[in-house]
Amino acid sequence: MAPLIEKLERRNAKEANLPDESFLEPSDSESDEDDERFSSDSIRRRVDEFDRKCKRQSELLRSFAEAETLDDAHKIMTKIDKFEQRHLSLPLEYRVIGDMMNRLKDSTGKERFILLQKLNRAVRLMECKEAYDPSNPANFGLIQHQQVDSPDDVIDNAGFDKEKQMIQGESLDDEDEEFNEDKEKDDMLIEKLNAIEKKIEEKLADLDHTFGKKGRVLEEEIKDLVEERNSLTDKKRRPMYRKGFDVKVIDVNRTCKVTKGGQIAKYTALLATGNYHGVVGFAKAKGPTAKIAIQRAYEKCFQNLHYMERYEEHTIAHAIQAKYEKTKIYLWPGQMRSGMCAAGRTVETVMYLAGFSNVKSKIIGSRSPLNVIKALFIALNAIETPKDVEQKFGRTVVESYLL
C-alpha cells in the first residue's frame, strides 16, 4: 500500500505544479502583442479622455450658473442632459456595485464575507461584459483591405486599424455640423448611384433592339457601368471586426471548371472565430482566389456568433450527440486537466475557440469540415445547463455526490 500512496502523492504534486493554461491553445491573432485596449497607453488615453469629459461638464455647469435669462439656462440645461447621457451615463450594474460597497462599510462577520464574494463576482462580470459588449464601439475595428480590381491582384492579409477616439470637449453644434457633412456625402453618393442605375436601364432597353457590333459595344458599356456601381458601393461598405476574438482557417477548397476558353478556378474558405469565453462562430465564403475567399469569410464570421454555456468554465454539462446529413458527432464531458480528446483538428479548433479545454468527441460518417462544424454547433446548442433543467422541471439541481 505504501508504494501506491507515494505514487499518488507524486502525481498530485506534479498536477499541482501545472499552470492553469496548460491545455489552452496558443493565441492565433495576427499580432503577437497583447490586446491594445489593456495596454498602458490605451489606459492612459482613456484617463485623459475622462478628464476632458469632466472639464467639459464643469464648463457647461459654470455657464449654466452664469446664465442671464431663463431661455439661455434652458438651452444650456438641455446641452448638459445630452452630454451626460452620451458621455457620462452610468450603467445600472455599477449602481448596484456602489450600493454593495456602501453596505460593505457597515457589515461584519459572515455578511461581510458574502458581500466581498458578490462584489468580486460582479466586478469580474462587468469587466468581461465591457470587453465583449457588442454595443460598445470601442470593441470594434475597421477591417482594412485593398480594393480588388481583378482576381490576379495581390491582396494583403486583413489588418487591424485602431479606431479613432472621439474628440471630447467640442460643442454639440460642431457634432451636428460633422453629421451634416456625412449626410451630404451620403446624398451625393446616392445621386451618383441613381444616375448610374438610370443609364443601365436605358442601355438595357436599347440592347433589346440592337444587334451586331453595336450590340456588343452596348454590352461592354453596360459592364463598365455595373463595375463603376459596384466600386462605389464597395467604397461605402465598412466591414468591422470584433476585438478580443481570434480567427482560424478551418479549410480552403479549390474547384476547377473546364470551359472552351480554359479552366476557371474558384476557392471556398471556411473560417471559425471565438473569444475563448463561450462566444464562437463560423462562416463560409467563395472567391476567385484563396485570399479573396478568406477575406470575405473573415468579414462574415463576425455576423454569425453563438454563445455556448460552459460547465465550470472548462467543459460541457452532459454527454450529447447530434447529426447533420451524413455526419454524426458524440461529445462527452471530461475531468479537470484531462485535456481535449478531439476527433480531428476541426472539432479541436472550434472547441478551443469556444473556451472548452476538457471535452472528448467522436465522429461517425462523413468528415467534411462544413458538415462537422454544423453538427458540432447543433450539439453545443442542444446542451441543457443546470439552470435550464431547473426552469424546465421546477426543481433544484444539485451535484450527485451531495445526495
Image (tube, grey):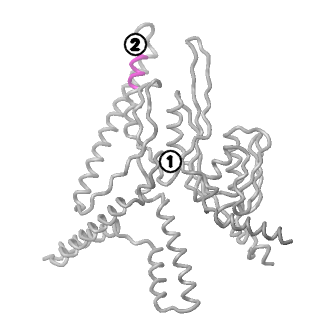
> Which quarter of the figure has residue 266?
top right
Identify residue type, mark 1: Ser
Q: How many marks can you see?
A: 2
Q: Nearer the viewer, residue 346 or 32?
A: 32
Relative to 312, say whether 217 is above or below: above
Q: Which residue is mark 2?
A: 217
Name the secondary structure under disc 1.
loop
Identify which residue is drawn at 31% across, 42% down: 187
Identify which residue is drawn at 27% across, 44% down: 184
Can you name the residue that lies furthest to the left here? Answer: 68
Q: Nearer the viewer, residue 193 or 60?
A: 60
Identify which residue is drawn at 32% across, 66% down: 47
- The numbered mark at residue 29 is 1
Task: Please state, as top left, top right, bottom left or bottom right, where the N terminus lies in the image.
Answer: bottom right
Residue 52 lies, in percent from the top left, at: 26, 66
Identify residue type, mark 2: Val
Magenta span has 79? no
Residue 95 lies, in percent from the top left, at: 44, 78
Q: Is residue 20 left or right of residue 365?
A: left
Can you name the residue that lies furthest to the front here? Answer: 3
